[in-house]
Image (cartoon, grey):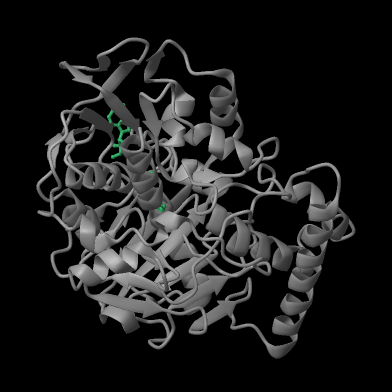
Amino acid sequence: MQRRNFLTLSGLTLLGAVSPACGEQAPGTRAATSQQRVVVIGAGLAGLAAARELHNNGYDVVIVEGRDRIGGRVWTSLDWPDMPLDLGASWIHGTQGNPITELADQINAQRVVTSYDRAITYNTAGAPLTAAEASLMADLRAQVLRAIAAAQEAETDTSIQQVMAPLRQPLEPDSEAARFINFILSSEIEQEYAGSIDQLSSHWYDSDQQFEGDEALFLPGFQVIPEFLAQGLTLELGQVVQAIHWQSAPLRVITQQTEFLADRVVVTLPLGVLQADTVQFVPTLPPDKQAAIAQLGMGVLNKCYLRFPDSFWPADVDWLGHIPANPGEWVDWVSFQRVANQPILLGFNAAHQGRAIEALSDQQIVDSAMQTLRTIYGDPIPEPTDHQITRWAADPFALGSYSFNAVGSAPTMRHHLAAPLEASVFFAGEATNGDYFGTTHGAYLSGVRAAREIMAQ
Ligand SMILES: Cc1cc2nc3c(=O)[nH]c(=O)nc-3n(C[C@H](O)[C@H](O)[C@H](O)COP(=O)(O)OP(=O)(O)OC[C@H]3O[C@@H](n4cnc5c(N)ncnc54)[C@H](O)[C@@H]3O)c2cc1C
């Protein structure tokens, strides 16, 4: 969701593909025709980037997509005509040098910047943190960071939860310090990486790289990027891939309705879908790829947009934080009042909490969110006039929000996930990107990388 510089970054190691020469890829700049037929599975950013690059270089490309829309985990709802809402990715995380910025610039997409400097945090009772509470929070945060830094030097990997045990054990579970630590872990680790602290690897959870710059939202919605990339490409929507036969030429991609023949295939199935094993590979995938699929984690981040008649919260803040009694419950909120002049709040639930909330009805989710908001702003605040709620774990074409480094995984596994099968099947998608997993730019760059692997054959 958000990319805070939680731990000190060890510097950026940018892929060659970070300067993807987007100008060269603009729709309509096609190179000489190649006879090669490539089937790209998935019309998310990874698939669209791969298809765009190959199309521009003369390949005969078809994108086979299970949904009836493009974008995958980039999905803008237009249900509220005056306010497009991103149900999947919202932000360009770090605008400087980010390939999504380059694409957005090409189409002059209108963006606004949210800032963690415009934030207010409320204690469990709903009052803004006092100076003493803010100081305790800073102190505990330093302790959390020190514990993780020490764990990252240790021989054996453990979960973040295990690392936190010495800090948390002496505390009463309901004590202020325990709640503050839970808040730090949820807001700064679980909401960002979407894995829960009992699953996240302390060694590797933050092995990703980050771009510098602002956190920018698209006013017309992130969907403008997949729409731009898809221009002029051949798309087969509503084609749910069931099997990929890759042993002999031509390769066969079998869907519920038909089959597509190809010289090469690019697979951009989300990690959650690969883990569910709903797409059969014939023959089966090699052991190191299977191990990567099994051991990397697929996290959950869910969104709940609430629309009110008027805003009752401070108009000049972008982020609202609440330290809940129940760990992970509605800890982070974004306000659209300042950036979009709309009385809309977006509440998040991540990791176990994000998964658990999917079992509730919309009304139960709204009631639960309102309980938190009433704790902060008082009983008289109005009911929302409307809501929009996501359930990414239950979405059969995603089965989660984005990947994380689980205990038992290692960064090399993302390379195994990305490795081609016999120069015929190539893999892209956010989970294959060791530097930028869990992001739109990671997905985009992985697609460019897979296309260039094919072009290098
Ligand atoms: C709630 C949420 C918030 C996020 N916030 C941000 C953010 O603010 N900034 C950011 O940079 N990133 C964010 N992300 C992450 C980002 O959205 C993803 O990393 C990225 O969009 C993944 O792109 P992809 O192409 O790898 O996968 P996808 O977009 O999932 O594309 C894969 C495609 O494969 C299709 N597919 C699946 N199964 C089949 C099948 N059997 N047959 C055919 N097609 C199939 C899917 O429908 C999908 O279209 C967020 C994600 C979520 C869910």
**Residue 11 shown left or right of residue 449 in the figure:** right
Relative to 136, 185 lies left or right: left
Q: Is residue 94 above or below residue 310?
A: above
The reply to whether residue 357 is visible in this rendering is no
- Give the number of callouts: 0
Residue 243 location, x and y as percent? Answer: 32, 16
**Nearest the eye: 145 or 11:** 11
In the rendered image, residue 241, in percent from the top left (x then y), is placed at 27, 23
Q: From the image, which quarter does the C terminus lie in?
A: top left
Quadrant of ligand 1: it is: top left
The structure residue drawn at horizontal position 53% and vertical position 18%, both measured from the top left corner, is: 286
Q: Residue 222 at x, y = what percent?
A: 27, 61
- Which quarter of the picture shows residue 104? bottom left
Residue found at x 58% / y 19% = 287
Q: Is residue 229 at all visible to an observer of this figure?
A: yes
Q: From what the image shows, is residue 364 above or below residue 415?
A: below
The residue lying at 59 percent from left, 56 percent from top is 328
**What percent of the width, then of the height, locates residue 378?**
47, 77
- Quarter location, residue 183: bottom right
Residue at 63% x, 75% y is 123
Q: From this view, report whether residue 201 is shown above or below residue 28.
A: above
